[in-house]
Amino acid sequence: MNIANLLKRTAKTYPDLPALAHGTEIVATYREYEDQVARLAGALRGGLGLNAGDRVALIMKNHPEYWIALFAVWRAGLVAVPVNAKLHIKEFRYILENSDSRLVFATPELADQLTPLTTELPELEAVISIDDENYLALKQEGPLPLQDAAPDDLAWLFYTSGTTGKPKGAMLSHRNLLTSILSYFADVTAQDPGDAVIHAAPQTHGAGLYGLPLIAKGGIQVTPLSGGFDPAETLELIAHYPNCSFFFAPTMIHRLISSPAFEGADTSNLKIIVYGGGPMYEADIRRAIDALGPRFAQIYGQGESPMTITGLSTALIRDENHPRRSEILASVGTERTDVEVNVFDAQDNPLPVGEIGEVVVRGDVVMLGYWKNPEATTESLRGGWLHTGDMGCFDAEGFLTLKDRSKDMIISGGTNIYPREIEEALLTHPDVAEVSVVGRPHEDWGEEVVAFVVLRKEGAMTPEELDRHCIEQIARFKRPKEYFFVEELPKNNYGKVLKTELRARLSR
């Protein structure tokens, strides 16, 4: 059940279809792609001396070679450790040491800073730049046949973003990845040979998972020349590639449709934007639909349950006549085909419709556990359910609405206040671009609500105006007690707002 069989099968059926592209240039057909993968896999198990189950880190800015290295690792029966290229060298060191990676494939701008780690970490034998002659020589080795893998063999160590501590390595098996792909076809969209996915978000994280369905069906992996997200470049690629799709964080959608390059751009080739990885507020998705049409699908998932917990389908987003359209757009949809989802109280008892608790999930997509962390594994997977740490509630029709991370809930005067509800209210003001609500310690009430607000344009917006706007929509006691107007919100490398940093600002 080696996940690399996806490429082997597609290369046999569609050998001459384009597989990998850099900008608008096709750099490999499926025949060429599989041949390079097989030869690099041969070098991994041959001259480089790696053994089944060894870990290989991929520390790369988005690049077509990522897809070659990733599938070579799997073909060789090894474990991939994809790492976001934007992390700090100390974070790279921690992940390489924790995973006991024996080898790193890196893009040139990262290889130089990573190479000294080979003398510090006993398990790390080499850092190989993908533009080095040695790397090119590895792809000339004799091809390796596809190695066998059991369904529950480890395939990917998916390190969490680590916003509240050291990142943990979620162990994803070949079964987990295949289940995630099948769920994409069941719940998100079909793919046809020649469709394209444009990787503007990091391939080493959620966006990379959305490349796998395209490989299964003979699609094109398109890497922007910039290696990242530039709205003008993204729009040019949309105009070039028919039936193209993206995985975007909500902040990327906002940047795309707010870009000066968006006006007059040809987006007719756009098939679907799958969004997730952070909250998409109702006001924001309505603006996006107005700008691009209802070509969206939402996913809610985690690295521990790769992009598969609930989803809001294109059909539901498109349905303007649904009597509960506002509530549906503000939700994260219904449970996906391959999982069971529930909401538990603090004692792990299921809660009835409408009551807020922790979202839990189980199914074949859920991780094996955390790498070398049995305590965290036991805690997260207790009772056979993955405890997500997210707070939410189901309605009678099965739509899940997230309130917040459990750690972000504000308790004021003994009452639970969920920041997302306040953020949703503030974002309906036409001059508010972004907002993040956190709790601030209060001597009498325990915590009080404060809001950090990014405006769409400079102006004379006052806290009193925002206060009036809030009171029109939510209970008076929930409104922020203070507003901080900021130029931008602090975010991590995956576009998630760092509420820990906002709380730290309050204590300075």
Image: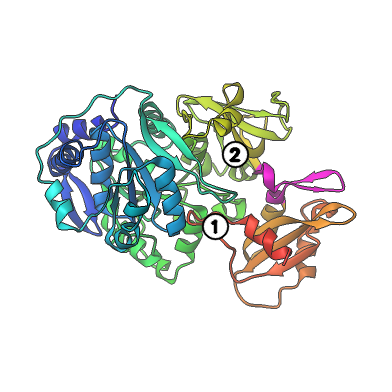
Residue labelled with disc 2: 322
Work out whether residue 497 or residue 246 is closer to the camera in this orientation and state it: 497
Specify the quadrant of the image occupied by residue 330: top right
Work out whether residue 6 or residue 245 is closer to the camera in this orientation and state it: 6
Within 10 Å of disc 2 (Cα), the crowding (few <14, some 14-19, many 20+) is: few
Residue at point 51%, 60% (across, down):
254
Disc 2 element: loop
Query: Which amino acid is tagged 2?
Result: His
Query: Which amino acid is tagged 1?
Result: Arg
x then y, percent, for residue 233: 34, 64
Residue labelled with disc 1: 287
Residue 247, labelled with which disc?
none
Quadrant the C terminus occupies: bottom right
Report the label total: 2
Work out whether residue 419 or residue 267 is closer to the camera in this orientation and state it: 419
Disc 1 element: helix
Within 10 Å of disc 1 (Cα), the crowding (few <14, some 14-19, many 20+) is: some
Q: Is residue 94 left or right of residue 414?
A: left
Residue at point 74%, 66% (across, down):
483
Q: Is residue 496 above or below residue 78?
A: below
Magenta highlight range: 403-421
In the image, is residue 404 part of the stretch drawn in magenta?
Answer: yes
